[in-house]
Amino acid sequence: MTGMDEQKRKDIKLLKEYLSQYYISSIKRLQLERRLRNIREEMNTPIGGRGYSPVNYGGTNKVGPGAASFVYRMSEIESRIEEQKNRAEKNLLKIMDIMDFLEESSMERMVLELRFIDCDNWEDIAKEIHLGRRTCIDYQNKAFEKLLGFKKVRSIIQEYQREKDENGVL
């Protein structure tokens, strides 16, 4: 494989990673929301669960973290969820900017939108556009080729790589 082929492969991998930012930030938001639901459920569960007795037989005056710790954890998670929503929105806009380089009614764009904006798997994409899975993947690859033909797109993914290198993983 020549150096040009190797660079092209790297560019396609980087473009795919760039386009996956929305999906990744959405997954993180869903994880945080699930965590928040679990904490809320935990708060609503009686102490000791089944067979709970309201009488304190321990006779201690110890104060544990109790509800205050739950409230703090919930507040922290709610803040993170909001940050993640904002990050997801920004990532979606960045991805849509890249998609605008493809013709609006093209099959390539449709496949990329289903894959990277709607976050569909290949089977669902194939059903949606009534094509085989392999054909859908071929359209994705054609879209990558077209996108990398634009100087601005290459510039965007190079900047993304620089930010990644400076900050570690984004």
Image (tube, helix red, strand yellow):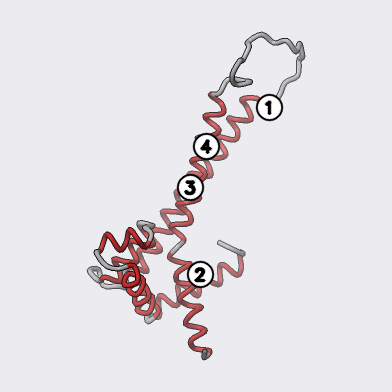
Q: Residue at x 51, y 39 (%)?
A: 78
Query: Which residue type does callout 4 highlight?
Result: Leu
Q: Nearer the viewer, residue 3 or 94?
A: 3
Name the residue located 37 percent from the left edge and 69 percent from the top edge. 98
> Reading the chain from its start, which is encountered first: label 4 or label 3?
3
* Residue 14 location (% of width, % of height): 49, 72
Which residue carries the number 2 mark?
160
Find the distance from the CA under tag 3 to the CA under tag 1.
27 Å
Coordinates of residue 8 in the picture (x, y in percent):
47, 82
Image marks 4 and 3: residues in contact by CB distance under 8 Å: no
Q: Are marks 1 and 4 in contact (CB under 8 Å)?
A: no
- CB under 8 Å between callouts 2 and 4? no
The residue located at (55%, 35%) in the rendering is: 75
Label 2 or label 4, whichever comes before in sequence order: 4
Residue at the disc numbered 4: 36
Image-quadrant location for residue 138: bottom left
Screen quadrant of the C terminus: bottom right
Tell me the CA gap for discs 2 and 4: 31 Å
N-terminal-most mark, 3 or 1: 3
- Please tell me whether mark 4 sits on a helix, a strand or a loop: helix
Q: Earlier in the sequence, mark 2 or mark 1?
A: 1
Tell me the element at label 1: loop
Q: Nearer the viewer, mark 2 or mark 3?
A: 3
Report the side of 102 relative to 8 (left or right): left
How far is the residue under mark 1 from the one under mark 4? Answer: 18 Å
Q: Secondary structure at mark 3?
A: helix
The quadrant in which residue 48 appears is top right
Residue at numbered disc 1: 65
Q: Which residue is outermost to the bottom?
A: 2
Mark 2 lies on a secondary structure that is helix
Please name the residue that numbered disc 3 is placed on. 29
- The CA span between labels 2 and 1 is 43 Å
